[in-house]
Structures are given as C-alpha cells and as structure tokens.
Image (spheres, rainbow, N blue to C red):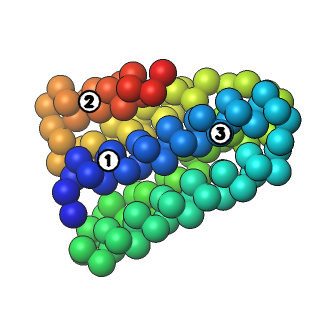
Amino acid sequence: MDRSAIVGEMASVLHILHSSVKKHLSDKNFDGLKWRIDWTLDEFYRVSVELGRCGFWGVVKFICNCANYLVPYARLAMSELVVSWTNNMILRLMGELGSVFGISGCIGRCVGFWLCSIFC
C-alpha cells in the first residue's frame, strides 16, 4: 500500500467529515452528523485493517489509538458548539502519521499543516 495513498485516504475521510459538520450545523440534522462521525471512525478502522493485512502493525495501533482524537470538534458540533477542526492535537496527530509512514525532515514536521491547509 502506497504511503501517499493512505495519507490521502485518511485526509479525504476527514474532509468529508468537515463538510458534513458544516452542512449539519446549518440544517440542525444532528442524527445525520452522528451517523457521519460513526462512518468516519469506521473508515479509519477499515484503513487500519487493510494496513494490518500488509503487516504495518505500528500504524494500525496508532490509528486505533488516535482515531477518536480526530472527531471531537464534530461531537461538540452536535451540541451546537463550533470548535476549529485544525487544532493543535489534530496537527500533531497528522504530523505523527507522517512520521509513522516515514515522511521525514521538514515534510514530516509540516505534514499536518499541509493536510489542513488543503481543506481550510
């Protein structure tokens, strides 16, 4: 499995969640938002299962441990609290994901900023 494809797939899932938060906040459909949060976590676990089949057990453990830290802004949106989705925790986790996949140097340190700048 290609590293950039994995990071791209996870970023895509986060982007879909971000768009759903915007949509469901405006139309007050919090059941739909709850479904999207669950779908997002399921997608992260699906990616981790694929990575497990390839033998990347460290990455699998990391994704399973950190998946819930990527959706708190969406959970707070269900209470109509708006929190930035690009907080320091998410940036650190995306940077760690870059280092787990072996992206080193400036790119490894800045991968979180790069991913978030795409979607902001």
Left or right placement of residue 74 versus residue 106 in this view: right
In the displayed orientation, state which residue is furthest to the left. Answer: 105
> What is the number of the mark on residue 116?
none
Q: Which residue is mark 1?
A: 7
Q: Which is in the foreground here, disc 1 or disc 2?
A: 1
59 or 51: nearer the viewer: 51
> What is the number of the mark on residue 109?
2
**Element class at badge 2:** helix
Cα gap from disc 3 to disc 2, whole angstroms? 28 Å
Query: Of callouts 1 and 2, which one flags the residue occurring earlier in the amino acid sequence?
Result: 1
* Number of disc labels: 3
In the displayed orientation, state which residue is furthest to the bottom. Answer: 53
Task: Evaluate whether residue 3 shows in this view.
Answer: yes
Q: Quadrant of residue 57?
A: bottom left
Q: Is residue 116 above or below residue 99?
A: above
Categorize mark 2 by other alpha carbons within 10 Å: few (<14), some (14-19), many (20+): some
Q: Residue at x 58, y 35 (%)?
A: 18
Which amino acid lies under the numbered mark 1 shown in the image of this protein?
Val
Which amino acid lies under the numbered mark 3 shown in the image of this protein?
Ser
Name the quadrant of the N terminus.
bottom left
Q: Residue at x 48, y 59 (%)?
A: 44
Q: Which residue is mark 3?
A: 20
Which percent across, then down, holds residue 45?
49, 65
**Element class at badge 3:** helix
Categorize mark 3 by other alpha carbons within 10 Å: few (<14), some (14-19), many (20+): some
Left or right placement of residue 82 versus residue 101 in this view: right
Q: Is residue 117 above or below residue 49?
A: above
Which amino acid lies under the numbered mark 2 shown in the image of this protein?
Arg
Q: Are marks 3 and 1 in contact (CB under 8 Å)?
A: no
